[in-house]
Image: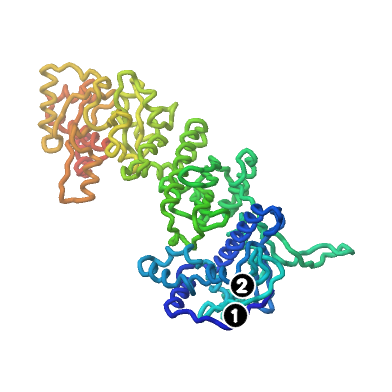
Amino acid sequence: MSESSAPKHSIPFETATKKLLQMMIHSVYTKKEIFLRELISNASDAIDKRYGTALEHPDGSYGPLTRESYAIRLSLNKDKRLLSVSDNGIGMNAEDLKKYLGTIAFSGSGEFRENAAEKDAAELIGHFGIGFYSLFMVADRVSVVSRKAGENQAYIFQSDGDEAYSISPGTRKTVGTDVILHIREEKDVEKDTYDRYLRPYTLYKLVKEYSDYVRWPILLYMPTLAPDEKGEPSEKWGWEQLNSMTPLWKRSAGEVKDEEYEAFFHEQFGKKLDVHAGKKETFRKPLKVLPGHADGKVRMDYILYIPSVSWNSFDTNDDHPGIQLYSAGVKIMDVCEKLLPEEFAFVKGVADCPDLPLNISRETVQSEGVLKSMREVLTRRIQRALEDAMKNDRERYEKFWEDFGKTILVEALDEDNPHHEKLRDIVLFESGSEEIRKTSLEEYISRMKPEQKAIYYAKGKSREEIAKLPEIERPKALGVEYLCFVDQAESLVPEIMESYRDHPFISLTDGEPEPFLRKNAGTSDADTEEFLAFMKETLKGDADDVIASNRLESHPVILSSGDGITFAMEEGLRKMNPELHAKAKKVLEVNLEHPAVRKIKEIRKTEPAKAEKYARILFNQARLIAGIGIEDPSAYTDLVLSLWTE
């Protein structure tokens, strides 16, 4: 292995090429540590090529036929500030070095400039061998010593990444490649910018983070503690394998135990949840574990985890990775936001697609078509899993819904979301039925009365508050189920969805009740007509109409808005634009059978002034029940007190 030194017989970079190289090194790569991933990936590709060629030539002329004979080796020389990445892959001759490592510096520079003029330079990653040059973020010079399979002569590529490169004959006893980096001198010791790459533990961490599933062994020459002849701990140097090689998602689902999936989930996504509000045990099993393989429009292996509890339920400000993106076992991103729609952003997991090039950051993924196909596969799988959980694991699904339901509902109401109709199938609402509690729309429809055509609902601050509304008494008496819309998103359901599977949403508190919900409003005789006319005249300017109610059971009055805008809509419109002067009708519905109403009906003939006071009190009570408040609380108080002093 040769120590890196300044290039001899160097070929100077063109000025434009030099600028492009500096741009790629200092602008495109957002993390310096990514260089090791790039070099290991190149080494893995080289072994792939040699092993494949060896299988085509079983005489052994191109290499061993056993996988165990191949490896990627990392070694350090801290005193000389050298880090070496070596492989026994296919190797390169002078022409290959020029083609694969000197592309940007030689034959590809013109083409690169032409493309860079038209595109973001980040989009060119993977087309010009730029990944190799990421090493200059941590190294000030590099030597590549390589010998190609089937050839005896080795060659050395040398460059300082700034002024020049060279290719010259060299020596290497075996086929393969050594990439020898001279790590930059530390300018600021406190920042530990470069020295960290000369420590075995740093390399171990980076391999585990980015290259743990590379399919060839990654070995590090490092010290380990082992007992000597006397049983005392002694430091011994040797090759230690860093990577596990076989990712969990590459194994057959039938071979993986549930405990292994859960351990992986905890290791990758649950590390920050060990401390929560003083509780000893915080780990929660995921609601669903979804391993899978796709081999249609896109090739992909994946494991998805649908959490059973929200990350926000824990006392932590740490970000938690979503879908980690891999390409052939090499990590590309911690979080690939393009792989999941907004409604399923809470899903965690990994997706591995060999059709993706190695990219540096989320800005550099150019394979939009591949990512779109991956997203479609994952979205369908999650949707099916949630549908299954809703039907077959109801208790856990309802708990899941408490944490993640609002996110799904908001997207189900967004008609620009291509999946909004499917999402509506997995939405849960509070049911007014004590036995049901939570229900999907499909389940609600399955329990509708034979004569019922609509989905009934009521809005309020809580399920309990809604249950006390006067308008709810009649449906309850008839055993008619209704939905409780208790938050802002749910309140928009009737206006946005309008119907579900041809069943319209109808409010129990607004407008005229459905025919089969109506009760007999009482005898419409001359005395009743005179009483309603008296009430209307008394409340002139406050109530738009006074009618005999056909839905009240035990309450004397309610206030409805007729068929126009509702009280809630009036409030919302006024908040958005006070100049609109939006106003809902105020129709006072009177329960003619209620004792209070009968009393007013009696005394209006003998004490009309007192009857008027009672009428106004009932109207203000109706306003309170409707949730629109009393316009003049002081006047109302005086009105009530005046009855006490008579």
The answer to whether residue 387 is visible is yes
Q: Is residue 578 left or right of residue 285?
A: left
Inspect the image, locate mark 2, and give the three-letter code of the amino acid beneath it. Val
Does dot 2 land on a helix, a strand or a loop? strand
Q: Is residue 634 left or right of residue 230?
A: left
Quarter containing the C terminus:
top left
Q: CA distance from mark 1 to mark 2?
A: 20 Å
Q: Residue at x 30, y 37 (%)?
A: 497
- Counting from the top left corner in percent of width and height, residue 578 is at 18, 50
Task: Decide: is 427 above or below 329.
Answer: above
Q: Quadrant of residue 205?
A: bottom right
Labels 1 & 2 near each other (Cβ < 8 A): no
Give the residue displayed 58% in from the left and 48% down from the top.
265
**Residue 455 percent across, percent down from the top left:** 32, 28
x 39%, y 29%: residue: 442
Three-letter amino acid code at the position of disc 1 = Glu
Kindly identify which residue carries mark 2.
144
Left or right, 127 with respect to 581, comes to right
Residue 490: quadrant of the picture: top left
Between residues 508 and 396, which one lies in front from this camera angle? 396
Q: Position of residue 27 (x, y in %)?
A: 45, 71
Q: Which residue is mark 1?
A: 185
